[in-house]
Amino acid sequence: MNQHVFLTGACGFVGKVLLPILLAKGYRVTCASRLASSHAGSAAEWVTLDINDAKAVSCVIEQVKPSHVIHLAAQSHVPTSFREPAQTWQTNVMGTLHLLEAVKTHCSEAFFLFVSSSEVYGEFFKAAELTAESADCKPMNPYAASKRAAELAIEQYFRQGLAGAIARPFNHIGAGQSPEFVSASFARQIAAIEAGKQKPILQVGNLDAQRDFLDVRDVCNAYVALLELKTVDIEDRIFNIASGQPRRIDDVLKLLLQQSSQEIAVELDPERMRPSDIPLAAGDCTRIHSLTGWQPSYDLSNTLAELLGHWREQ
Ligand code: A2R
């Protein structure tokens, strides 16, 4: 089969990192974005597409006839999902359904990789140190619930013969991520302090919480590894993309502060302390490792140093 990937959400944080990795691996890639025209000229092909438009999705998939779909496009912002739950479900569930139907109609042999989120585990995280894919999903926000709903839709297509996999990535780190995420927030503040744009006080939330961090390039390499997956049982098609190593937020902060020669005080910001915080969220990554050989390759302190370098250049 011709190796032609259809990549949605190509202009997002992950999409921008994944695209060059796919091209370097020799995949032909057609990227979809709502603002595609601005990317004409890159090595990939681009289409302008709103996944909420079922007809447009069908037309594009009929033309492209990809061998693989990587579906990243989503309303991925948790606070927005509380403000706009219907829009979040529309894009994340119905948008996914439009793609599934188009693939079923026009290229039913294609491999469909759906990028979900570790957020689907939600409250279950309180029950285990390392959460495996077999855990109960107990979403705690509309974003996570919509991703779980989309997973259920995909599982039904899997049972009807669709090839594919579902990825549940844990926390990613990398340049280009919104400073609403903890590592980017710390790095941005340190860079601002060094540049004299912020008092030498770094505002933090809950430093005791433990999370599972991966370099976004490792996350993307995992997606590429999943594209090459051979047939597996439907029950085994969900994959945690995780390091399997819980890290205290405090340790991430310390690693970043070590990169700076500046004297920086740390101050708790009550606004950043969420009472619903999950104390520990980390994933068991045994399944993806045993089925594809994937494992993380980037060292956390190097990733954080690069992140800080990125913010220093802003
Ligand atoms: O269309 P754009 O360029 O605004 O791209 C956004 C895209 N997107 C959509 N694309 C087509 N039709 C829509 N109705 C639509 N709504 C959103 O999804 C945006 O660039 C992309 C998602 O990018 P980020 O929010 O930066 O997410 P990130 O961190 O790259 O995560 C990738 C995936 C998401 O599905 C997460 O939920 C998952 O990884 O964990």
Image: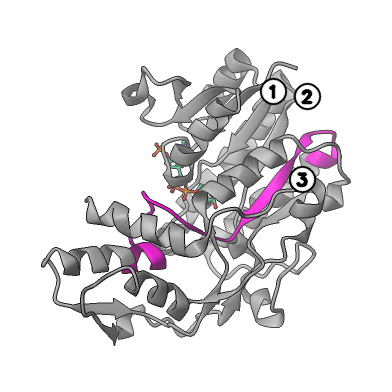
Color scheme of the displayed model: one colour
Closer to the eye: label 3 or 2? 3
Pick whichever of labels 1 and 3 is earlier in the sequence.
1
- Which kind of residue does numbered mark 3 sit on? Thr
Q: Are marks 1 and 2 in contact (CB under 8 Å)?
A: yes
Where is residue 75? Give x, y as percent: 46, 49
- Which kind of residue does numbered mark 1 sit on? Ser
Where is residue 124? Give x, y as percent: 68, 75
User: Measuring 72% from the left and 66% from the top, which residue is drawn there?
Assistant: 284
- Which kind of residue does numbered mark 2 sit on? Glu
For this orientation, the residue located farthest to the right is 233
For this orientation, the residue located farthest to the top is 63
The segment highlighted magenta reads 158-186
Pick whichever of labels 1 and 2 is earlier in the sequence.
1
Q: Is residue 163 magenta?
A: yes
Residue 292: mark in rendering: 3
Q: Name the residue under label 1.
A: 67
Q: For residue 52, say whether it is visible.
A: no
Where is residue 307? Give x, y as percent: 36, 56
Q: Mark 2 points at which residue?
A: 109
Determine crowd level at label 1: few under 14, some 14-19, many 20+ residues with C-alpha closer than 10 A. some
Q: For residue 77, say whether it is visible.
A: yes
User: Measuring 86% from the left and 43% from the top, which residue is drawn there?
Assistant: 232
Kindly report the distance in space between the C-alpha atoms of the residues bearing marks 3 and 2.
21 Å
